[in-house]
Image (cartoon, rainbow, N blue to C red):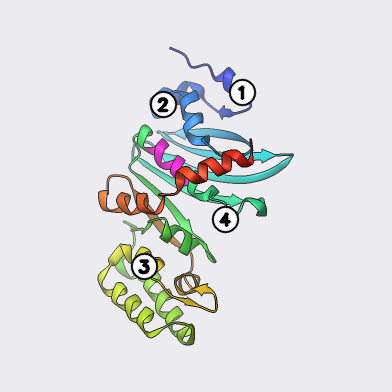
C-alpha cells in the first residue's frame, strides 16, 4: 500500500519515496513521530537515499523564524549502522536544557524500530568528550587501522597529556583512579573517567580532563546489554526533560 507522503509535506522530504519500504521498515508518519518526539519548534526531516540502502538524513527545527538546532546523519541499512555527522544547538537559550538527551533518546527509539544495531559519532572538542562519555558512549573501534592508530590509543595519549597539564588542579586520588582506568577499562575508560567525583575551583575535574581530549570516535551498540544499562541509568531523567521541553513550547 503506497504511503501518503503528501500528508507529511513540510515535515518530511524524501528524494526517492519508492525506495522507502526497501530500506526503512517503519511507516513514514510513525518514523517522523518517533524521530521528532518532544523536540522543540517545528522539526523538518529530510532523507536522501544514495543507493544500496545507504543515505543521508538531516533534521532541523525552527521557532519564531530562528533555527533552534540542526543534525546530520548517514545511515547504512544493510550494515545496521547510523553515523551522526553533526549536531548543532544553534539557540544559546536551548543549551543545557536536555535537548541533546531527548535527541539521543529519539535516535535509540528509531534505531530499534529500524533494526539498526550501532550509532557512531565524533565527540568534538570542549564539552563533546565529557557529554557523550556521560551518556555512556564507548570509544569506537576502527576495523581498517592498526592498534597504534585506534581511537583508544589517541584517547589514552590525550588523557596522559591532560594529567600532566592539569597536575596542580587534580587530586591525587582522582589522578590515581584515572591511571587505573586507563589500564583496566578499555573502550569504557572514557565513561569511567566522566563519572569520577572531584571538583576544583567549582569545575568538575572529569570535565576539565576530558576537555584535553581531541575529537574521538565513540559508539553506542544497542545489543550490548552492559552499555545500554549504563546509558539507561544516565537517561533516568528523560521523562522529566520531555515534560519540561513540551511545557516551554506549549
Residue 222, numbered label:
none
Instruction: Report the residue marked by disc 2.
Output: 26
* Disc on the earlier residue, 3 or 1: 1
Q: Residue furthest right?
A: 65
Foreground residue among 46 and 175 = 175
Do callouts 3 and 1 mark residues in contact (Cβ within 8 Å)? no
Q: Residue at x 50, y 30 (%)?
A: 33
Instruction: Report the residue marked by disc 4.
Output: 96
Alpha-carbon distance for marks 2 and 1?
18 Å
Residue 249, by quadrant, is: top right
Foreground residue among 174 and 212 = 174
> Which segment did they paint magenta?
103-111
Alpha-carbon distance for marks 3 and 1?
45 Å
* Disc on the earlier residue, 2 or 1: 1
Residue 149, numbered label:
3
**Vertical comparison of 162 with 47: above or below:** below
Residue 1: percent from the left, percent from the top?
43, 12
Alpha-carbon distance for marks 3 and 2?
38 Å
Amino acid at each position: 500500500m503506497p504511503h501518503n507522503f503528501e500528508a507529511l509535506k513540510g515535515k518530511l522530504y524524501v528524494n526517492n519515496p519508492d525506495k522507502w519500504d526497501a530500506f526503512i521498515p517503519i511507516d513514514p508518519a510513525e518514523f517522523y513521530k518517533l524521530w521528532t518526539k518532544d523536540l522543540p519548534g517545528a522539526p523538518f526531516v529530510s532523507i536522501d537515499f544514495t543507493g544500496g540502502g545507504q543515505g543521508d538524513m538531516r533534521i532541523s527545527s525552527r521557532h519564531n523564524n530562528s533555527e533552534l538546532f540542526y543534525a546530520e546523519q548517514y545511515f547504512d541499512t544493510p550494515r545496521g549502522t547510523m553515523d551522526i555527522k553533526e549536531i548543532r544547538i544553534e539557540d544559546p537559550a536551548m543549551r543545557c536544557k536536555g535537548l541533546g538527551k531527548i535527541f539521543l533518546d529519539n535516535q535509540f527509539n528509531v534505531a530499534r524500530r529500524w533494526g539498526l544495531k550501532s550509532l557512531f559519532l565524533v565527540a568534538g572538542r570542549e564539552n563533546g568528550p565529557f557529554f557523550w562519555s556521560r551518556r555512556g558512549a564507548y570509544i569506537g573501534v576502527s576495523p581498517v587501522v592498526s592498534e597504534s592508530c585506534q581511537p583508544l590509543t589517541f584517547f589514552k595519549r590525550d588523557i596522559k597529556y591532560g594529567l600532566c597539564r592539569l597536575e596542580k588542579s587534580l587530586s591525587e586520588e582522582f589522578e590515581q583512579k584515572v591511571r587505573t582506568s586507563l589500564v583496566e577499562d578499555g573502550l569504557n575508560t572514557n565513561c569511567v573517567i566522566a563519572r569520577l567525583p572531584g571538583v576544583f575551583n567549582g569545575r568538575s575535574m572529569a570535565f576539565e580532563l576530558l576537555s584535553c581530549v581531541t575529537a574521538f570516535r565513540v559508539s553506542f551498540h544497542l545489543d550490548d546489554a552492559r552499555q545500554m544499562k549504563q546509558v539507561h541509568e544516565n537517561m533516568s531523567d528523560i521523562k522529566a526533560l520531555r515534560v519540561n521541553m513540551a511545557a516551554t513550547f506549549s
